[in-house]
Every structure is written in C-alpha cells, then in structure tokens.
Amino acid sequence: MRKIFVLIAAAAALTTAACNTISGVGRDTTAAGQAVTGAAEEAKN
C-alpha cells in the first residue's frame, strides 16, 4: 500500500512539473513572437 502511495505522489509531482514547463515554453514563444512582430514593424517604418 505504501509503494502505491509513493508512486501516486511521484506521478503527481511529475505531472505538475510538466505543466509548469509547458507553461514556460508558451510564455517564451509568445515573447519571441512579440519580438519578431516589433522588429517587422520597425523595418516597415
């Protein structure tokens, strides 16, 4: 029973870490897109 609890706790921790990583990638991608958009606007003007 104790092993099952430890496995469930480890799975929950890994799932939470994965969500945070995916969220960080999304923020990084958004920032990169904004930088490209800004550079394109400056080049256009």
Image (cartoon, helix red, strand yellow):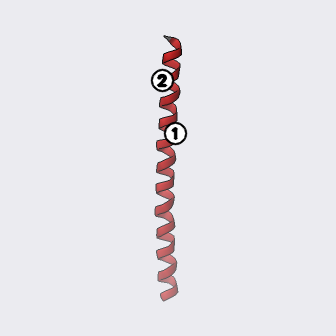
Residue lying farthest to the top in this orientation: 45
Residue at 49%, 61% in the rendered image: 17
Which kind of residue does numbered mark 2 sit on?
Answer: Gly
User: Compared to 42, does 25 lie above or below?
Assistant: below
Residue at the spot x=52%, y=22% of the render? 39
Residue 35 visible, this angle: yes
Give whichever of 15, 21 is nearer the camera.
21
Q: Residue 2: where, in percent of width, then height?
A: 48, 88
Image spot of residue 32 (x, y percent): 52, 34
Kind of residue at badge 1: Thr
Q: Earlier in the sequence, mark 2 or mark 1?
A: 1
What residue sits right under mark 1 in the picture?
29
Say which residue appears at 47% left-offset and 68% top-offset: 13
Q: Are marks 2 and 1 in contact (CB under 8 Å)?
A: no
Alpha carbon of mark 2 to alpha carbon of mark 1: how far? 14 Å
Question: Which residue in the structure is indicated by mark 2?
Answer: 38
Q: x%, y% of residue 15?
A: 49, 64
Secondary structure at badge 1 equals helix
